[in-house]
Image (spheres, rainbow, N blue to C red):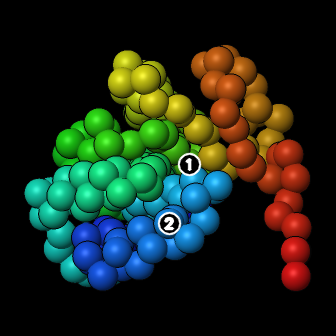
Amino acid sequence: MINLDHDQFVDRQMLQALVAVQQQVPDHQLIIELTERSNGVSVLETALVDAAHFINAHGLKLSLDDVGSGENQISLLRPLLPFSVEVKFALQNFTTARPDNYEQLVFWQKLALADAKDFVLEGIETIEDLALADQLSINLRQGYYYDRPHQFY
C-alpha cells in the first residue's frame, strides 16, 4: 500500500512511476491509499477522477483513507467511489461521544456497502471500539487493540 496526498495522487509522473513498480511485481497488487492530508495545494475533482481512471486502467487499485476527515470529504470522494476497492474510516479522527460522528461512521459504512466496496474501521484501540465494530457488523478492522506494528528491518 502506498499513501498519497491529493496533490501527489494527481501527479502524472508519480503515477507512472507506480505503474512501473506494479509492472515489475505482477504477482503483487499495488494499492494507492488516498490520504486526507492537505499540502495547501488545491486539487480539482476532475484531476482526481482522471488520476483514478489512470491507475485503474493500469492495474492499480484505489483505497479511500480516513474518509470524512481532512480533505477526504464526500464532495470530493463521491466521484472516486466507482474507482475504489475500499473505504477506510479512522476512529481516531472522531469521538463517538458526539452523535453526528456516529452518524458519519454509519453514513460511510452504508455508502461503501451500497457500492460493493470493502469498509475498514481503523483505529480500534479499546474494548469499546471493538464493541462499536461488533454493533455495526464491521468485519474489516485494524488498530492497536489487535497488535502494534512490528519492526521488520
**Residue closer to the observer: 138 or 92:** 138
Name the residue: 88% across, 67% down. Answer: 150
- Image position, residue 119 (x, y; %): 53, 33
Name the residue: 17% across, 73% down. Answer: 42
* Circle 1 crowding by C-alpha within 10 Å: few under 14, some 14–19, many from 20: some
Q: Secondary structure at mark 2?
A: helix
Q: Which image quarter is the N terminus in?
A: bottom right
**Residue closer to the observer: 10 or 37:** 10
Residue 46 higher or lower than 21, as above or below: above
Residue 129 higher or lower than 64, as above or below: above
Name the residue: 64% across, 55% down. Answer: 27
Amino acid identity at mark 1: Ala
Q: Which mark is residue 23?
A: 2
Name the residue: 87% across, 74% down. Answer: 152
CA distance separating discs 2 and 1? 31 Å
Task: Give the mark, 2 or 1, whose residue is nearer the N terminus.
Answer: 2
